[in-house]
Amino acid sequence: MTNQTKPTVSSRSASSIGDLRVYALARQLEDQGIALSSALPETETYGLANDLRRSTAAIAHHIYEAHRRYSYAIKLDSLHAAIA
């Protein structure tokens, strides 16, 4: 087991998407994915680089969509799509 701390679960609900820590982390991942894709060789512009940019953007998008949902069950389905 690594020395990572377990994430804490808060009982308060986020009033806006900006309050969600997981969304902020997903946006950071998206920025890192863009930086990494720009460092790839030019031959990968439409291959791996494109897939990397699209997949990292999709994570934040799915979290945003789940936050907009009203039903808890629908939120879980949307979040499941983000990790699938």
Image (spheres, rainbow, N blue to C red):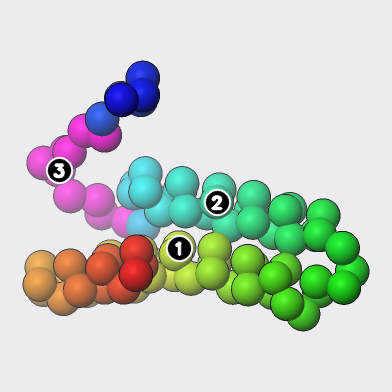
Residue 9 forms part of the magenta stretch = yes
Left or right side of 26 for 13:
left
Q: The residue under label 2 is which amino acid type?
A: Leu
The residue wearing badge 2 is 29
Q: Are marks 1 and 3 in contact (CB under 8 Å)?
A: no
Give residue 16's quadrant in the image.
bottom left
Q: Does the magenta stretch include residue 40?
A: no
The local secondary structure at tag 2 comes to: helix
Disc number for residue 60: 1
Which portion, as a residue range, is magenta?
7-16
- For the stretch drawn in magenta, the main secondary structure is loop
Q: What residue type is labelled 1?
A: Ala
Q: Left or right: where does residue 82 sit relative to residue 60?
A: left
- Which of the two discs, 2 and 3, sits closer to the camera? 2
Task: Tell me the quarter of the picture where residue 57 sits.
Answer: bottom right
Sequence order check, earlier mark of 1 and 2: 2
> In which quadrant will I find the N terminus?
top left
Which residue is nearer to you in this view: 43 or 78? 43
Q: Badge 3: few (under 14), some or many (20 or more) residues near its Cα, within 10 Å? A: few
Determine the CA span between mark 2 and mark 3.
Answer: 25 Å
